[in-house]
């Protein structure tokens, strides 16, 4: 048994600085040195191994096993989702159906700003609620690039849009997991998050369009943005507070899409926005980029299509929605998992690493069991949806196999990157490096409610998952809240709410976005674009939590 050490140098400041080295290495190489993402991730992983073994005293064998455990988690389920989503997308591009889908969306509105609301925010929220784990960015990034958006706009804006729904992703998995980790009622936690994130479900659509079209471009379509945001925020609050955390995103996204489409039948902007690039000028790198993933990304003249052709073009995505929703339900998992669900114990790591106070209330061993639930992984549902859609599009079995091999070759570096990213994130968890960073936030006293949200942001930025962030810091949030006399429900919920804003800067999501848009090697450009948006939105969440902790009438919003 090895017990984690959170201050190996006897100096909290020095220990915290050493703990930041893997993160600084990763972000520095990607954002500033412009090193290819897979090379940057592998380099940062080496740095993380050195920090864990040399600085924090983790046994070498345990460190390498933890990295291997994380790499496997990166490939399944996350890499499995990416390759299969891109496989489906490439099939629709190759047979021309995506061009028809593009025309049908343009038939609803040819305004790029409204397309962003419909696809990136509302449609993406459905995939977040049903599947999570990178699915919404993979799907919406691919669709936006197919609609003709520039690579930076498609990738960066799909990341910004995928924020407000994240806490209720994968049918409420982050909230349910937070309840399990902290021992608090998941319904109360979900309700508290539902009294925080609806504010940002109103803000994010405005923020999204401002980031794309500027202040004036945003004001020109404020009625549509307001309809989209309110139609999402109100169901988000109602479902989370009166039903539970499970169907929040699914219901809210469907209501938002329906209301926006209905509103666009009676309202149109005075000026149609057709530019596919960011107005800020930060898009100069991608404005002249070659058409990604096929000819569907090349602007073309809008054409009319028969209702039958439009239905056939949408059919693969309808099939995808059905499969993803079924695969996300607990009933399906309960029926299918018993058929084949091997669990592999990582000997030499399982229950041999011990978390200790003050990160947890009492010493607790860390399990290291990998459940290979391949039958119920979201990626498997996406693969089956792609195969069914392929046959519906009249592909032969041999052509499907060939197309899958081609897709694997396209995303090979992305899979390496994701495996290395998750290896790094898992290693920091088992070595206690992440807890050292978390404890630094916990020393902020009166300002802790603000930093509680920022701690959630850090957790997601490190792990790429709101669920993993809740596992990582949920216990610490509860303990610190008790020590400071703050609401445990509020502080733990803030971990999840603040975490959603870290989703756009975690390296895993950025790689998913660059893969979906075929903009390989530009992960640094994407990171530089979204970073300050992420920080600003997380700070706003922290400000709201401060109000809910100390200022009436916001304190009345806290779930007791």
Image (spheres, rainbow, N blue to C red):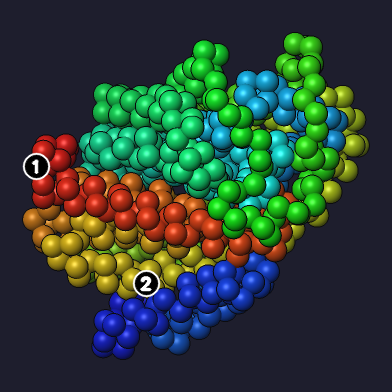
297 vs 354: above or below: above
Please tell me whether residue 278 is drawn above or below residue 415 in the rendered image.
Answer: above
Residue with the mark numbered 2: 432
- x then y, percent, for residue 272: 61, 29
Provide the residue designation for mark 1.
Answer: 552
Report if residue 39 is visible in the image. yes
Q: Which quadrant of the figure contains the N terminus?
A: bottom left
How far is mark 1 from mark 2, CA to CA? 38 Å
Other-residue count near label 2 (Cα within 10 Å), few / some / many at <14 / 14–19 / ≥20: many
Using the image as rendered, state which of residue 298 and residue 558 is in the foreground.
298
Task: Specify whether 396 is left or right of 549.
Answer: right
Q: Nearer the viewer, residue 169 or 290?
A: 290
Residue 451, position as x, y percentages in the image: 26, 60
Residue in the image at 77% along x and 25% along y: 302
The answer to which of marks 1 and 2 sits earlier in the sequence is: 2
Above or below 186: residue 531: below
Q: Is residue 123 visible?
A: no
Secondary element type, mark 1: loop
Q: Residue 270, how many percent across, how many down?
A: 55, 25
User: Is the C terminus in the top left, top right, bottom left or bottom right quadrant?
Assistant: top left
Quarter of the image for residue 365 reads: bottom left
What residue do we see at 64% from left, 72% from top?
34
Please tell me in which quadrant of the rendered image residue 176 appears.
top left
Q: Nearer the viewer, residue 372 or 521?
A: 521
Kindly identify the residue that appears in the image at 80 percent across and 33 percent down.
Answer: 300
Of tags 1 and 2, which is closer to the observer?
A: 1
């Amino acid at each position: 048994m090895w017990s984690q050490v959170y201050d190996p140098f006897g100096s909290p400041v020095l220990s915290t600085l050493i703990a930041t080295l893997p993160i600084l290495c990763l972000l520095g190489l990607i954002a500033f040195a412009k090193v290819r993402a897979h090379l940057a991730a592998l380099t940062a992983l080496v740095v993380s191994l050195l920090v864990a073994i040399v600085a924090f005293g983790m046994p070498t064998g345990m460190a390498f096993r933890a990295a291997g455990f994380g790499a496997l988690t990166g490939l399944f389920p996350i890499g499995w989702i990416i390759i299969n989503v891109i496989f489906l997308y490439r099939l629709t591009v190759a047979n021309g159906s995506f061009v028809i889908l593009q025309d049908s969306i343009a038939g609803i509105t040819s305004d790029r700003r409204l397309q962003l609301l419909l696809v990136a925010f509302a449609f993406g929220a459905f995939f977040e609620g049903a599947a999570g784990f990178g699915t919404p960015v993979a799907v919406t990034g691919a669709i936006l690039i197919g609609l003709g958006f520039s690579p930076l706009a498609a990738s960066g804006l799909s990341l910004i849009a995928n924020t407000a729904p994240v806490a209720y992703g994968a049918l409420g998995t982050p909230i349910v997991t937070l309840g399990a980790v902290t021992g608090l009622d998941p319904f109360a936690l979900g309700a508290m998050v539902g009294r925080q994130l609806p504010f940002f479900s109103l803000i994010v659509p405005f923020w999204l369009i401002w980031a794309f079209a500027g202040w004036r471009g945003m004001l020109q379509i404020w009625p549509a943005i307001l309809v989209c945001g309110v139609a999402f925020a109100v169901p988000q609050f109602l479902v989370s507070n009166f039903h539970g955390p499970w169907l929040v995103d699914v219901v809210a996204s469907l209501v938002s899409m329906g209301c926006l489409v209905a509103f666009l039948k009676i309202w149109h902007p005075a000026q149609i926005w057709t530019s596919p690039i960011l107005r800020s000028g930060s898009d100069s790198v991608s404005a002249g980029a070659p058409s990604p993933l096929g000819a569907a990304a090349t602007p073309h003249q809008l054409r009319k299509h028969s209702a039958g052709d439009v239905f056939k073009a949408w059919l693969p995505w309808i099939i995808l929605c059905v499969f993803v929703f079924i695969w996300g339900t607990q009933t399906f998992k309960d029926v299918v998992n018993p058929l084949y669900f091997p669990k592999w114990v990582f000997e030499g790591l399982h229950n041999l690493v011990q978390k200790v106070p003050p990160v947890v209330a009492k010493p607790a061993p860390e399990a290291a069991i990998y459940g290979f639930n391949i039958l119920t992984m979201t990626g498997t549902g996406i693969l089956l949806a792609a195969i069914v859609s392929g046959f519906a599009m009249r592909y032969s079995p041999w052509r499907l196999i060939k197309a899958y091999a081609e897709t694997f070759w396209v995303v090979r570096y992305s899979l390496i990157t994701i495996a290395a990213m998750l290896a790094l994130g898992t290693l920091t968890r088992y070595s206690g490096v992440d807890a050292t960073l978390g404890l630094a936030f916990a020393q902020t006293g009166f300002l802790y409610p603000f930093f509680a949200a920022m701690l959630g942001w850090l957790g997601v930025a490190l792990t790429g998952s709101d669920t993993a962030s809740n596992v990582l810091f949920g216990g610490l949030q509860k303990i610190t809240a008790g020590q400071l006399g703050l609401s445990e429900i509020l502080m733990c919920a803030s971990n999840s709410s603040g975490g959603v804003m870290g989703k756009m800067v975690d390296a895993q999501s950025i790689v998913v976005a660059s893969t979906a848009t075929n903009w390989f090697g530009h992960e640094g450009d994407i990171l530089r674009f979204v970073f300050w948006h992420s920080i600003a939105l997380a700070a706003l969440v922290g400000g709201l939590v401060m109000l809910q902790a100390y200022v009436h009438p916001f304190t009345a919003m806290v779930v007791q």
